[in-house]
Image (cartoon, grey):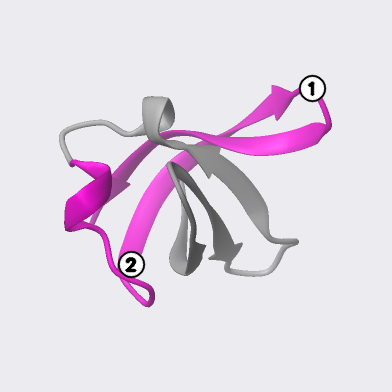
Amino acid sequence: MDTGSIKKLLNGFGFISRDGGEDLFFHTTDLVDVSFNSLHEGDTVQFEVGQGKKGPKADKVSRV
C-alpha cells in the first residue's frame, strides 16, 4: 500500500498527493471504511495504485 495526503476534494472525487510520485485521481466509489464527506484536504490516506480510463488512479483508499 502507498501513502499520501488528500490534495483536493471536489464533487464526489478528488486527488491524492502521493509520497514520491505523481498526484492520483480517486472517486468516492474507491473509498474503503470511510465516507467521502468525512474526508478533508490534508488527511493522510493509504491506497493501492490501479489503472483508470485516463491512467493511474488510487484504489482501496482509506484514512490512516
* 1 or 2: tag closer to the N-terminus: 2
Q: Which residue is the extreme one toward the right?
A: 54
User: Looking at the figure, which quarter contains the N terminus?
Assistant: top left
Question: Which percent across, then down, holds residue 52?
Answer: 72, 25
**Which residue occupies 37% across, 77% down?**
42
Q: Residues within 10 Å of mark 1 (few under 14, many from 20)?
A: few
Q: Residue at x 53, y 41 (%)?
A: 26
The x, y position of residue 16, in whole percent, is 54, 59
Q: Which residues are magenta?
A: 35-64
Q: Locate residue 13 relative to residue 57 in the image: left or right.
A: left
Q: Which residue is mark 2?
A: 44
Count of residue discs: 2
Q: Main secondary structure of the magenta part?
A: strand
Q: Is residue 32 above or below residue 61?
A: above
**From where the camera sits, is residue 1 visible?**
no
* Crowd band around label 2 with a 10 angstrom C-alpha radius: few (<14), some (14–19), many (20+): some
Q: CA distance from mark 1 to mark 2?
A: 25 Å
Which residue is at a point 58% across and 67% down the rendered structure image? Answer: 17
Q: Amino acid at mark 1?
A: Lys
Element carrying mark 2: strand
Residue 57 located within the stretch drawn in magenta: yes
Q: Position of residue 22 (x, y in %)?
A: 75, 61
| Location of residue 3 (image quadrant) | bottom left
Residue type at mark 2 is Thr
The label number, if any, that marks residue 53 in the structure image: 1
